[in-house]
Image (cartoon, rainbow, N blue to C red):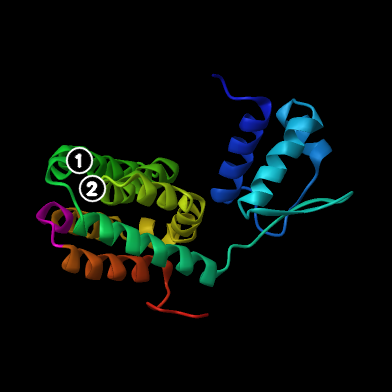
Amino acid sequence: MPPTAADRAHIHLRAEILQGRITPGTMLSESELAGRLSMSRTPVRAALTRLQDEGWVTIYPQRGALVREVGEQEVWDAAAVRHALESAGVRRGVPSLRDALSGELAENLEAQRVALSDNDFASFMSLAMRFHRGFVELAGNAVMLSVYDRLQDKQAAAIARSSGTITGDIDQVIAEHRRLLDDALRGDWVTFSTHLDDHQTRNHGLESGSTR
């Protein structure tokens, strides 16, 4: 089933926000967006409502939709939940799933390196999110995956906020991801959890357990 006009508007606006082309504090106008996207205001309104439900904008009747700033604590809270789910995925990993994912995640890791080398940060973001999701998949638990997927927007925001750190030391990022993959393939969830905490702290610029 092809995406509706509202779906297309949502995908476009979400990508613009996540990649920093629409910055926090921007007031979005339904009529201006409708003209820019060559569609009526109705699907634009539906897209903005969905973005508000996801926490990206706040709608003010008769004024427009204000793009929200995702705060440090919000980023860290989501990262803490992802840490718990990824670590649990490695801990409860099903051997057959571990074997099946090993090749895929190794290929993903090489694709991350290429994307960063080519200055294609959007592709890297998509690959990195898929890479981390793979650790949750190891448990073969649909409920865990469902909870994890609800955090994808916050994960994308965290990666976008860390773009300077990531692009400033590509080798370090790839090395950290490779270390996580090695831990996961060994089923060493304790070491994986420690390395993941180090990885998140370095990239988000927050101390573990921060309450800021």
> Seen in the image, is 132 located left or right of residue 10?
left
> Seen in the image, is 172 located left or right of residue 121?
left
Nearest the viewer among 46 and 139 is 139
Residue for badge 2:
138
Could you tell which of marks 2 and 1 lies nearer the N-terminus? 1
Three-letter amino acid code of the residue under disc 2: Leu
Question: Residue 110, located in which quarter of the rendered image?
Answer: top left
Residue plotted at (16% across, 37% down):
100
Residue 13 at x, y percent in the picture: 63, 41
What span is colored magenta in the figure? 183-188
Counting the numbered discs, the total is: 2
Furthest residue to the left? Answer: 186
> Seen in the image, is 32 located left or right of residue 46?
right
Nearer the observer: mark 2 or 1; the answer is 2
- State yes or no: residue 115 in magenta: no
Residue plotted at (47% across, 68% down):
77
Question: Is residue 67 something that shows in the picture?
Answer: yes
Residue for badge 1:
101
SS assignment for the magenta stretch, majority: helix
Three-letter amino acid code of the residue under disc 1: Leu
Furthest residue to the right? Answer: 62
Q: Residues within 10 Å of mark 2 (few under 14, many from 20)?
A: many
Q: Which mark is residue 176?
A: none
Looking at the rendered image, the quarter that the N terminus falls into is top right
Q: Are marks 2 and 1 in contact (CB under 8 Å)?
A: yes
Residue 119 at x, y percent in the picture: 39, 45
Furthest residue to the top? Answer: 1
Residue 58 at x, y percent in the picture: 73, 55
Disc 2, SS: loop
Structural distance between the alpha carbons of marks 2 and 1: 8 Å
Residue plotted at (28% across, 65% down):
196
Residue 31 at x, y percent in the picture: 83, 37
